[in-house]
Amino acid sequence: MQQLARRIYQLCHTEGEFLLRSGQISHHYFDKYQLESQPDVLADIAQALVPLIPSDTDLLAGLEMGGIPVVTMLSHFSGIPCVFVRKKAKTYGTAKLA
């Protein structure tokens, strides 16, 4: 697990000057989208999360956009179906939130 944590840190941690959503400046930034674009790292994360899923889980859900790659990979390794949750219902098509 520590090796995976190191890989994630090396891939996602950046130093510099970053303006945060709060308006504050940070000299460290963790870009989780970097890990979501690396299939091998994403697979290792999902495999590490599978044992944490409660045994009575019938469905996994991932919030758009960032949760979709993680929940899809987690679904793949756990065999549990997944859904994608929208922040806001569409006004067209099925107009569903999930």
Image (cartoon, rainbow, N blue to C red):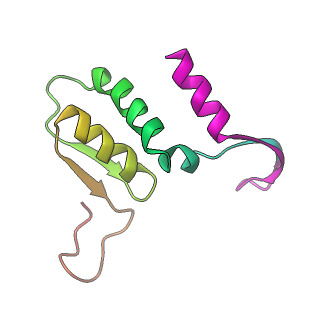
Which quarter of the picture shows residue 40?
top left
State the residue lying farthest toward the bottom.
Answer: 92
In the picture shown, does residue 20 fall above or below 43?
A: below
Which quarter of the picture shows residue 58?
top left
Which quarter of the picture shows residue 79?
top left
In this rendering, position of residue 39 left or right of residue 27 = left
- Which quarter of the rendered picture does the C terminus lie within? bottom left
> What residue lies at 29% left-to-right and 81% top-to-bottom?
91
> What residue lies at 27% left-to-right and 64% top-to-bottom?
97
The residue closer to the viewer here, 1 or 55, is 1
The residue closer to the viewer here, 48 or 59, is 48
The residue closer to the viewer here, 42 or 26, is 42
Q: Is residue 64 magenta?
A: no
The residue closer to the viewer here, 19 or 70, is 70
In the rendered structure, which segment of residues is drawn in magenta?
Answer: 1-25
In the picture shown, does residue 43 fall above or below 93?
A: above
